[in-house]
Image: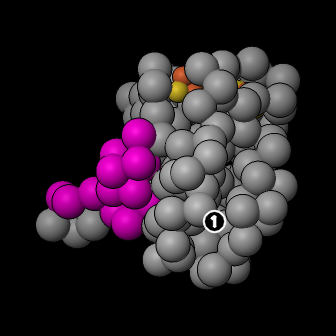
Amino acid sequence: MTTVTMTVNGRPVSGEVEGRTLLAEFLREGLRLTGTHIGCDTSQCGACVVHVNGRAIKSCTALALDLEGAEVVTIEGMANPDGSLSRVQQAFQDHHGLQCGYCTPGMVMSAAALLQDNPKPSVEQIREHLEGNICRCTGYHNIVKAVLAASGQDVSALAAE
Ligand code: FES
Ligand code: FES
């Protein structure tokens, strides 16, 4: 076992990990941050997406030991400082962008990363960006609508579909 230290949701954390310990496992089992979900463990579903050094990654594809000193943000770190939902989280709630919620943390983290890079994405760009996030409830329409709303754009055309 080796000690790894990183910043998670603004707090310095450390823990003992094996060389094979995935970031997703370290977050869930080591830090009890269970909002990061594991749906496939094979880099397909996107339920495990977190931000590392400002970029969205699938945490089931990263080894914890490789992230010594990294800045990690999980869904638990997405709320505003006053505890209210972030813009993206609120839009998911307002536009019914979730059903069972299993994919939702990864969707929110991926969507937030998209809006950082592209504050006014088109519907096509949203769909393309989220293609690595699978919703087994198939609620994609409202997820896209929520991301469009979070970007401050008109959702009426989508709402009519
Ligand atoms: S659990 Fe990481 S992509 Fe599915
Ligand atoms: S809301 Fe159920 S998997 Fe997406």
The residue under the point 61% across, 72% down is 115
Q: Residue at x 41, y 48 (%)?
A: 95
In the depicted view, which residue is nearer to us: 12 or 34?
34
Quarter that holds the N terminus: top right
Q: Quadrant of ligand 1?
A: top right
Q: Which residue is mark 1?
A: 113
Q: Is residue 88 left or right of residue 85?
A: right
Instruction: Return the x and y of residue 110 as percentages of the image width and height.
Output: 64, 54
Q: Is residue 104 visible?
A: yes
Q: Could you say where residue 136 lies in the image, as x and y percent from the top left?
A: 66, 19
Q: Which residues are magenta?
A: 83-96
The residue drawn where x is 83% and y is 29% is 44
Q: Is residue 128 above or below residue 1?
A: below
SS type, badge 1: helix
In depth, the one of 36 and 17 nearer the eye is 36
- Residue 71 at what x, y percent from top left? 56, 64
Residue 148 location (% of width, % of height): 56, 65
Kind of residue at disc 1: Ala
Q: Is residue 45 magenta?
A: no
* Residue 6 appears in the rendering: no
